Image: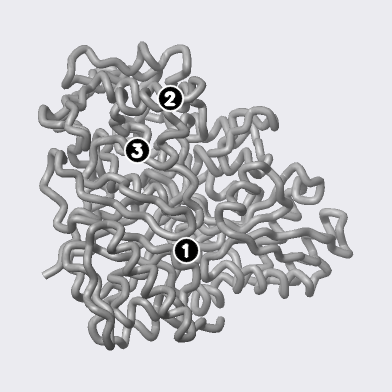
Amino acid sequence: MTEHHPGPAIRRSWRRLALALLAGTGLTAMAEGARAATPGNAMVMAWNIDAISTFDPAQIGEVVTSELLQNTCDSLVAFDPKDESKLVPALAERWEVSPDKQQITFHLRDSLAFPSGAKATAQDLAWSMARVVKLGFGNSATLTEYGFTKDTVEQRITAPDERTLVMKLDKPYPVNLVLQAVAANRVATLLDRQTVMKHEVNGDLGNKYLATHTECVGPYHLRQWNAGESVVLEANPKYWGPAPKLKRIIIRHVAEAGTQRLLLEKGDVDVARDLTPEDMQAIEKMPGITLSRTLKPQIVYWGFNNANPIFAKEKVRLAMRYLIDYEGLGKTVMAYNGVPRASFAQLGAFGALDEKEGQPFKLDLEKAKQLLTEAGLPDGFEATMIFGTLPYAAPIAQHIQQNAAKIGVRIKLEQMANAQLFARHRGREFETAMLAWQTSVPDAHGNASRQIYNPDNRAEAKLTQYPSWRHSFQDEKANKMVQAALLEQDEDKRAEMYHELQRDMMQRGPTAIMFQSIMLAGVRNTLKNWTWNGFAAYYDLASKE
């Protein structure tokens, strides 16, 4: 992989952009000199943010936008920054569970206010959650899978007074899972109903308006988004919790890892998010910069469209798994970005297979060839792989292409911007695709319910937030296993059910899962308390001397 070092003209262009951004947000930068410096009251981050398409919590699905929303919109509860397996109060200061486990009563804080200064109430939150279901975008699945439908959501999520929210479940689901999956999720965002509905267009419940605005309770709010250029978050003076240490967060869209590294080295940014192994290796030796890492609940996979007759064959999908040198890639391209993993359940999740059993594959061209022959394709076939702009995507795609060619499988590679990749994938407009998918809960159900379970495989169902649907994969046996495990009250039995499902899906599932991601960031030492875990990054805790 080659690094890109921009020339003087490009560096001047970036400097002008930085100064314009800072000037446009009321900040001042140090005069240009030997090295730039970011403002003392702002964090400036370089990140590939081309996937952003909306800030509506009912609709977003991208990792980038999810992180930004977490810092602008609090949910009912939150993951503990120090231990992602634990939950802590957020909008709700406490909650109670009924004996039958089918009702959770949340008691909201009494000091909640929107950035406008208007009081935020439980009625606003009940409306916000019902809105997710009524709009019916992909995130509605987070609620509908727990029994909340367009017809019932207003009866099942109610607000008897301004500080009480009652959530009535249709079945006795594991309480901790409901808290993780729903109460700590973006679907439990508290929106400013009055402001949002002022901007309603043709019954869209403010969806068009929220594409470029955040109107919720959180430590920051969205001040500015220039697509393909930058995002600016500004501290919310009406926030109920401790005031953010830094007044503004400025995220600059920088697609190339080499450019991010240069900006970090020169002090133009405080944090760089998309670095190559070569960049990270160099940064580890640099004074004044720290490489921060944390295991992420995200899997990197090569997915197959099962509507294609070739990939509808289980043996073909299994053969593709043997074209990947997991260990070799893990030591090179993914040395900093991930750990080999073939199971849909991420390490650290309840019910996940251990590191060894969760990755039983290795590069084996002879085995792959044998499986293709058994599938009736001894001479191979042709297919296209689409993939995005993450630094590791192209090297892995080329690696697979080269190995595939050795057994007669001719793969055409097509790289594109991440937003286009996601659109193609969600529209089932692909043969094979390499992507990453991040779950929102530390439980095997998180990925089982999206990567494996598919309640409706019809094209018109448009279940875009189900990768299983995107892959046209529906298996009745697997569906029943996912549902049974969800409702199993004995935790040991529930864990073993997920173990069995993982073993099964590694052999005949819709994707060749390759790695579990590691989140890495190059952080300048002038930025203190950069805090994150697998489920969130906490901008409000960061500070500068």
Marks 3 and 2 sit apart, C-alpha to C-alpha, by 24 Å
Quarter of the image with the N terminus is: bottom right
The three-letter code of the residue at mark 1 reads Lys
- Residue 149, compared with residue 67, is above or below; it is above
**Residue denoted by label 2:** 200
Question: At which x and y percent is residue 33?
Answer: 27, 85
Q: Secondary structure at mark 3?
A: loop
Q: State how the image is colored.
A: one colour
| Residue name at image x 36 percent, y 11 percent | 155
What crowding class fits label 2: few (fewer than 14 Cα within 10 Å), some (14-19), or many (20 or more)?
some
**370 and 287: which one is in front?**
287
Q: Is residue 486 visible?
A: no
Quarter of the image with the C terminus is: bottom left
Q: Secondary structure at mark 1?
A: loop
* Front of the two marks 3 and 2: 2
The three-letter code of the residue at mark 3 reads Asn
**Residue denoted by label 3:** 185
Question: At which x and y percent is residue 7?
Answer: 48, 85
| Residue name at image x 43 percent, y 50 percent | 352
Q: Earlier in the sequence, mark 2 or mark 1?
A: 2
| Residue name at image x 16 percent, y 63 percent | 543
